[in-house]
Image (cartoon, rainbow, N blue to C red):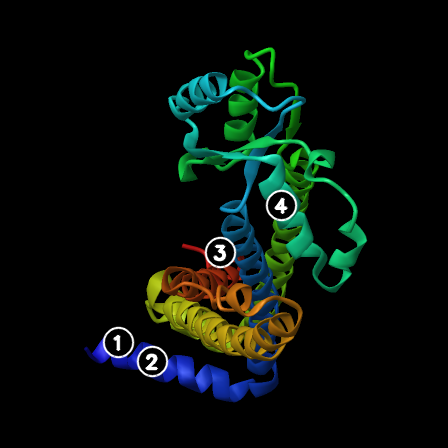
Amino acid sequence: MERLRYFIQRTIFSMKQSPLLCSATIGTVAIALMLLSFFTLIVLNVQNLTKQWSRDIQVVVYLDQVPSQSALEQWLEEIQTYPEVESVSYVSQHEAFERFRVRLGQNKDLLEGLMPEILPAALEVSLKESARSREGTESLISLLKSNKEFHNFRYGQEWLDRYDAFIFLLQLTGSMAGGFLIFATLFIISNTIKLTIYARRDELEIMGLIGATPFFIKAPFMAEGAFQGTIGAILALGGCHMLYYFFLKKGLAALLTTAAAENIHFLPVTVQVGVIVIGLLLGFIGSLLPLRKFVRI
């Protein structure tokens, strides 16, 4: 206990000796992790929102001719057996015409004089949750194409391609930015601890001469770095929460529907704990690097 108390006292004393360097280190960790946390928050919410939207994705098979009752029942039974299919329904020309009329709203008068036969009948196929992906959709399309009567499909292929490209770009950008910010944070923490060691090099040499072990000399500096990294991570989460509340939650709520805005959430608890652990490790490793050079075992 005495040794632990000494390490804590030395850590606090060292931080009081150089408040500007300490503040710079904490601020650097806070800004770097806040940017990383906010970017992660955006990616997670985008994936969550698109997952909600993907539930509405359907494969629509447009029919050139109205099928007979026996052929329609056979198609419905066959499609329902496909492993990717949750449900399948038939939309007649009259039903499609009424849907179109409702969508036009105040402009429904444009349809006066037109017959329902201008729109094709269709089969609407809903996918199971496990199959709501690009691979699942393409697998279902390949099964449907085995029927020669089916050749006109609509299933949002362009949307799926853009979604995959957008998510990949987000992840690539986040990885590159995260790597750069972590490297910069380690560099600043390392140099801050290095300046502290230079300021106390006479004291450290005396401690070594009177028999202090390398761990006894290093421990206060490592604790200082870990403490600064942890404080910076906590401040980063606070700043990220402010950005989330004023920018994401309020800003996107004005652009999205109420149901979609309710699906915007802050970082999960596990991610928040991970951010704090990363801050602690950044401070610890950043302080360990200069110590390996100046305090030889």
Q: Which residue is mark 3?
A: 292
Tag 1 residue: 4
Residue kind at label 2, given as amino acid type: Ile
CA–CA distance in space, label 4 to label 2: 45 Å
| Residue 89, horizontal then vertical, whole percent | 47, 34
Residue at the disc numbered 2: 8
Crowdedness near tag 4: few (<14), some (14–19) or many (≥20) residues, C-alpha within 10 Å:
some
Q: Is residue 80 visible?
A: yes
Residue sitting at x 33%, y 80% = 8
Q: Residue at x 51, y 17 (%)?
A: 143
Dot placed on the residue nearer the N-terminal end, 3 or 1: 1
- Residue 170 visible in the shown view: no
Which one is nearer the viewer's eye here, 2 or 92? 92
The one nearer the camera, 291 or 226, is 226
Residue 167, numbered label: 4
Q: Is residue 139 left or right of residue 227?
A: right
First-in-chain label (3 vs 2): 2
